[in-house]
Image (cartoon, rainbow, N blue to C red):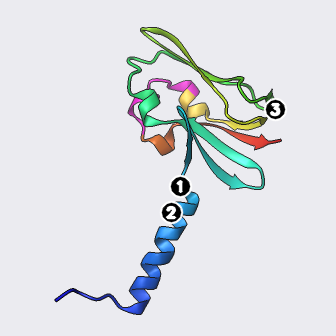
Amino acid sequence: MAKHESAWKQMFHFYRDEYHEKHAPMLYGDIWLQTKSHQRLVLGLTDPATAPLTSITGLTLPSEGQHLTTGDVLTTVTDDQGAHPFTTPFSGTVQKINTDLTAQPSDLANNAQKNNWLLILKAD
């Protein structure tokens, strides 16, 4: 006989799953994106993008207040194999950058995907 959940538990699971779907990051190639609030987007590198990078030595990000257009270089990651540029899927103005990653670029290979956020962009 199958175990039945209470109505409250079913409702809890439904809304929890709906919340996770609604707030899950969207993927655009090697970049993940998550909406924060009115036109604010958090952009980061996906796990498949960081997996082939070995011994990361540098990370270049745009400065706060800089305007990016779709297709501009979002970040350049430097490792022992050279420089790897990643482009932005959206245009907007940089609101905040992840200073922890710029200080320790090697963490990019070890962090969980959600901690590999690069910057917050205010979309046009």
Q: Secondary structure at mark 3?
A: loop
User: Of the numbered discs in the image, which one, if any, rests on residue 20?
Assistant: 2
Residue 31 position by quadrant: top right
User: Of the numbered discs in the image, which one, if any, rests on residue 24?
Assistant: 1
Q: Is residue 107 visible?
A: no
Which stretch is magenta?
Answer: 102-111
Mark 2: amino acid: His
The first of marks 1 and 3 along the sequence is 1
User: Measuring 77% from the left and 34% from the top, which residue is drawn there?
Assistant: 91
Image vertical order of residue 52 relative to residue 34, above or below: above
Q: Residue furthest left?
A: 1
Q: Residue 79 placed where, x, y %?
A: 45, 13
Quadrant including the N terminus: bottom left
Q: Are marks 2 and 3 in contact (CB under 8 Å)?
A: no
Q: Residue 69 placed where, x, y %?
A: 78, 29
Instruction: Name the foreground residue: 28 vs 33.
Output: 28
Q: Is residue 36 left or right of residue 101?
A: right
Q: CA distance from mark 1 to mark 3?
A: 27 Å
Q: What residue did someone put label 3 on?
A: 65
